[in-house]
Amino acid sequence: MDRVIYVGMTAAKHTMSQLASVAQNLSNIQTVAYKADVHVFKAIPASGPGNPTREYVVNAKVGTDFSPGTIEHTGNPTDLAIVGPGWFTVKMADGSEAYTRNGNFKISANGVVQTTNGLSVVGVDGGPITLPLHTEVSFGRDGTITSVPSGNQPSGVTVLGKIKLVNPPEDQVVKGADNFIRLKNGQNASADASVRLMSGSLEASNVNAIEAMINMIDLGRQFDMQMKLLQTADANASKASVLLNING
């Protein structure tokens, strides 16, 4: 009977883990370019005496849905969305590189292109991108940044740099708790000239609210069923103890 209780307990434990993941996805439905977490469960046959009719549940894989979200026009020239596969490169506080599709960028008081939380966007030369003040900046589809001096009589177009755009294979990257993507081997990805972006737009989260809500309801029912299994197993164990005491 203890084996039945353990099977029900492991199933309930991993169902709660998946419920937490779905709740996390729903809470980020408005987060720019958020990529949904995906839990994959696996059934493992329970070993031991008796017929092999029971199975344990294990959380075999916690993955990420890298499918793109819809592109929404904002009109802000520093809002960038990647069209198709690819990632922006940012410099983390520890000096390492990380990758994101969140192109909601800003220009700091010193002219540095940054994310909304202050991380510098990396250029193809590996350093931060610094823009001169009092200029009109535009971003090309390949990530090239050009500027025209502000005023009624602009003197010419100047190439200021180029954003480092990368496109590593999905099976070689992993999403961290901070929602940034990194290579599993800890190395830096190489720039990919084929990645294209769109200025004045942002990519929305790829979380489908309706599917997530249905999934949450389904998981809640599964959890209730697993709790009933535990209660039934406990009741059967109590009745068996009473019968054993009577026979004794």
Image (cartoon, rainbow, N blue to C red):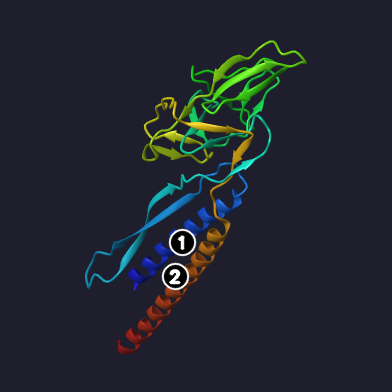
Residues packed near mark 2 inside 10 Å, few (<14), some (14 to 19) or many (20 plus): many
What residue occupies the far right of the structure in this picture? 152
What residue occupies the far front of the structure in this picture? 153
Is residue 68 found left or right of 50 in the rendered image?
right
- The image shows residue 185, relative to residue 4, as above or below, that is above
Dividing the image into 4 quarters, which one contains the C terminus? Answer: bottom left
Q: Position of residue 78 (x, y in %)?
A: 65, 29
The first of marks 2 and 1 along the sequence is 1
Dividing the image into 4 quarters, which one contains the N terminus? Answer: bottom left
Structural distance between the alpha carbons of marks 2 and 1: 9 Å
- The image shows residue 240, relative to residue 94, as above or below, that is below
- The image shows residue 206, relative to residue 230, as above or below, that is above
- The image shows residue 156, relative to residue 15, as above or below, that is above
Res 158 → quadrant:
top right
Check disc 2 and report its element: helix, strand or loop: helix
Res 8 → quadrant:
bottom left
Front residue of this view, candidates 136 and 40: 136
Which residue position holds label 2? 226
Residues packed near mark 1 inside 10 Å, few (<14), some (14 to 19) or many (20 plus): many
| Residues marked 2 and 1 touching at CB (< 8 Å) | yes
Q: Residue at x 67, y 24 (%)?
A: 107
Q: Amino acid at mark 2?
A: Gln
Front residue of this view, candidates 130 and 82: 82
Q: Residue at x 75, y 13 (%)?
A: 153
Q: Amino acid at mark 1?
A: Thr
Q: Residue at x 38, y 69 (%)?
A: 5
Which residue position holds label 1? 15
